[in-house]
Image (cartoon, grey):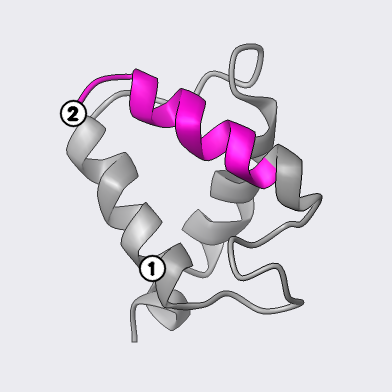
Amino acid sequence: MKLSKFDELDAKLRDLGSMWFSGQQNPSALDRDTLGVVAEVGAPVDPKVHPHLFGWYSLASKFSDKIKS
């Protein structure tokens, strides 16, 4: 996967105006799947290029065990 996937995910979060891809207060299966996508890309999320995704990842990575279950 390419970094363009990060562009897509960042735009989706920006458009949702939400902290999670579920658009709700809590993470969803889509958030779990997105953790996998970020791992597959294998590059760090640059806060200057993808600020929404970086914010999401900062939270999601702290709760990754809970999100993955």
Name above or below for residue 54 compared with residue 68: above
Marks 1/2: CA distance? 17 Å
Report the residue at 58% width, 74% height from top: 27
Q: Looking at the image, which residue is at 28% across and 46% down?
A: 37
Q: Position of residue 28 (x, y in %)?
A: 51, 77
Q: Main secondary structure of the magenta part?
A: helix
Question: Which quadrant is the C terminus positioned in?
Answer: bottom left
Say which mark, if any, is on residue 1: 2
Instruction: Identify residue type, mark 1.
Output: Arg
Left/right of residue 3 with respect to residue 21 in the rendered view = left
Residue at the image point whose x is 36% and y is 30% from the top: 5
Q: Amino acid at mark 2?
A: Met
For disc 2, the neighbor class at 10 Å (few under 14, some 14 to 19, many from 20) is few
Q: Can you tell which quarter of the image residue 35 is in?
A: bottom left
Q: Which residues are magenta?
A: 1-13
In reply to whether residue 14 is colored magenta, the answer given is no
Q: Is residue 54 visible?
A: no
Whole-percent x, y for residue 63 in the image: 52, 70
- Secondary structure of residue under mark 2: loop
Left or right, residue 16 beside residue 30: right
Q: Where is 26 relative to 61, above or below?
A: below
Between label 1 and label 2, give the one nearer the viewer.
2
In which quadrant will I find the N terminus? top left
The residue most toward the bottom is 69
